[in-house]
Image: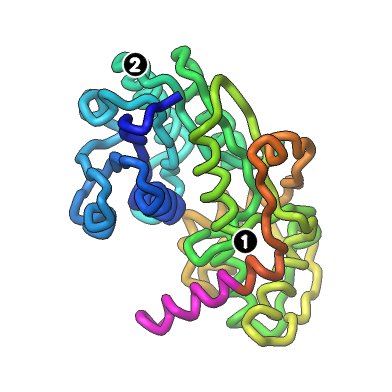
C-alpha cells in the first residue's frame, strides 16, 4: 500500500473523471501527481495543489520520470474522443502497454483502471477489456473497475441522451433503446476510484447504481430531470449503428466518430452481475433520479457559461 508521503499518479487528469478524481484526492490531502500532454490545460489542478508533469502515454520514455516514486497509479485514458485520430482500439492498446511497461520498470506497485461493463458486442467494449489486460501484463497489480453509463455532464453517453431529449419531442429509436443498463452517477464513480486507493493486489470490481433501466428509460429520466415531457419514441429495429451515429451527428453536438463506437456498444447489456466489489468498497451509489438531477444541473451551469 502507498504511504501518506507517496504521490498518487493520475494519467488522464485533464479528462472529465480524471480531473474530478485529482481534485477530490487533493482536497483530501493526498499528494497527487497529474500527467498532462499539455500542462496549460491543467492550471486548475496546479491551483488545487496537484503536481502537474508533462508526458504522453504514447511515448513510453516520457512516462519513466513522472511515474518514479509512485506506488499507486490511476489510468483514466481513453483515446475514443474529440481530437483522437486513427484506430482508437490500437491507440488505446499501445498506450496501455507503454504505461504498464514504464510502471513496471520504475517500481509502481498497483494500477487502477476504469473500464466498462458488458461482455463483447462491440469494439468499444472489447477495447476496454483489452486495455485492462495490457495494463496487467507486466506483473504490476491491477484494480479493474467496470462501470456502465456514467451519469454526468462530461460523459459522452449521457451527453448523447441529454441532447436527444432536449432537441427532439419525438424520435425514431433503434433496438438499442431497449437494452438494459445500470447507470451510475459520476460522483459515485469518483468515490469508487478514491476508495480503491486503499486496496491491495489484483481485483476486478463491477460498479453500478441501484436502478437497472434501459437506454429508453434513461431518456425518460433525463426528460424528468430537465422538466420536460418524455419524448415519444417510435421503434425502428433496422436503424443500424452507422445510420444511428449519422442521425445523432445531425441533431446533437456529439462527435460522429465518438457516437458510432458508443452506439455499437449499446446493444450489449451493461448490468452488474457481481456486487461483492461494491460491498468491499463500502460503496452506496445514489439513485438514478438523484444522479440525473445532479447531471442536469451540471449541464445547465455549463450551458449558462457557453450557450449551445
Overall secondary structure of the magenta stretch?
Answer: helix
Residue 287: percent from the left, percent from the top? 72, 63
Residue 50 picture location, percent across and down = 27, 47
Tell me, yes or no, if residue 60 can be seen here.
no
Q: Which mark is residue 277?
A: none
Density class for disc 1 (Cα within 10 Å; few <14, some 14-19, many ≥20) is few
Q: Is residue 155 visible?
A: yes
Above or below 119: residue 106 = above
> Circle 1 — which element?
helix
Extent of the magenta region: 294-308
Q: Which residue is mark 2?
A: 107
> How far separated are the C-alphas under marks 2 and 1?
47 Å
Q: Earlier in the sequence, mark 2 or mark 1?
A: 2
The residue that label 1 is drawn on is 243
The answer to which image quadrant residue 170 occupies is bottom right
Foreground mark, 2 or 1, reads 2
306 falls in the magenta region: yes
Q: Nearer the viewer, residue 150 or 289?
A: 289
In the picture, residue 237 is in which quadrant?
A: bottom right
Residue 133: quarter of image: top right
Above-or-below relation of 96 to 166: above
Q: Position of residue 164 (x, y in %)?
A: 61, 74
The image shows residue 59, relative to residue 148, as above or below, that is above
Quadrant where the C terminus sits is: bottom left
Residue drawn at point x = 31 percent, y = 31 percent: 5
Residue 228 picture location, percent across and down:
68, 86
Residue at 23% in and 43% down: 51
Q: Residue at x 48, y 36 (%)?
A: 89
Amino acid at each position: 500500500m502507498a504511504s501518506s508521503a507517496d504521490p498518487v499518479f493520475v494519467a488522464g487528469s485533464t479528462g472529465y473523471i480524471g480531473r474530478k478524481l485529482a481534485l477530490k484526492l487533493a482536497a483530501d490531502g493526498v499528494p497527487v501527481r497529474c500527467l498532462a500532454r499539455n500542462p496549460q490545460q491543467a492550471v486548475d489542478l496546479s491551483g488545487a495543489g496537484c503536481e502537474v508533469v508533462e508526458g504522453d502515454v504514447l511515448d513510453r520514455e516520457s512516462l519513466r520520470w513522472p511515474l518514479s516514486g509512485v506506488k499507486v497509479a490511476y489510468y483514466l485514458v481513453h483515446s475514443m474522443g474529440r481530437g483522437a485520430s486513427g484506430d482508437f482500439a490500437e491507440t488505446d492498446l499501445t498506450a496501455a502497454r507503454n504505461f504498464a511497461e514504464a510502471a513496471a520498470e520504475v517500481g509502481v506497485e498497483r494500477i487502477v483502471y476504469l473500464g466498462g461493463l458488458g461482455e463483447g458486442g462491440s469494439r468499444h467494449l472489447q477495447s476496454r477489456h483489452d486495455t485492462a489486460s495490457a495494463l496487467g501484463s507486466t506483473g504490476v497489480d491491477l484494480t479493474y473497475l467496470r462501470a456502465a453509463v456514467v451519469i454526468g455532464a462530461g460523459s459522452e453517453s449521457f451527453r448523447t441522451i441529454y441532447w436527444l431529449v432536449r432537441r427532439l419531442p419525438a424520435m425514431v429509436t433503434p433496438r438499442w433503446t431497449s437494452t438494459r443498463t445500470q447507470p451510475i452517477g459520476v460522483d459515485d464513480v469518483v468515490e469508487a476510484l478514491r476508495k480503491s486507493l486503499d486496496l491491495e493486489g489484483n481485483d476486478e470490481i463491477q460498479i453500478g447504481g441501484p436502478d437497472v433501466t434501459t437506454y429508453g428509460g434513461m431518456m425518460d429520466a433525463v426528460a424528468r430531470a430537465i422538466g420536460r415531457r418524455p419524448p415519444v419514441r417510435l421503434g425502428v429495429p433496422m436503424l443500424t449503428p452507422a445510420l444511428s451515429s449519422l442521425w445523432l451527428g445531425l441533431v446533437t453536438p456529439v462527435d460522429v466518430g465518438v457516437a458510432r463506437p458508443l452506439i455499437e456498444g449499446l446493444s450489449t447489456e451493461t448490468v452488474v452481475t457481481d456486487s461483492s466489489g461494491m460491498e468491499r468498497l463500502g460503496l452506496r451509489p445514489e439513485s438514478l433520479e438523484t444522479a440525473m438531477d445532479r447531471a442536469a444541473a451540471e449541464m445547465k451551469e455549463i450551458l449558462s457559461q457557453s450557450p449551445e
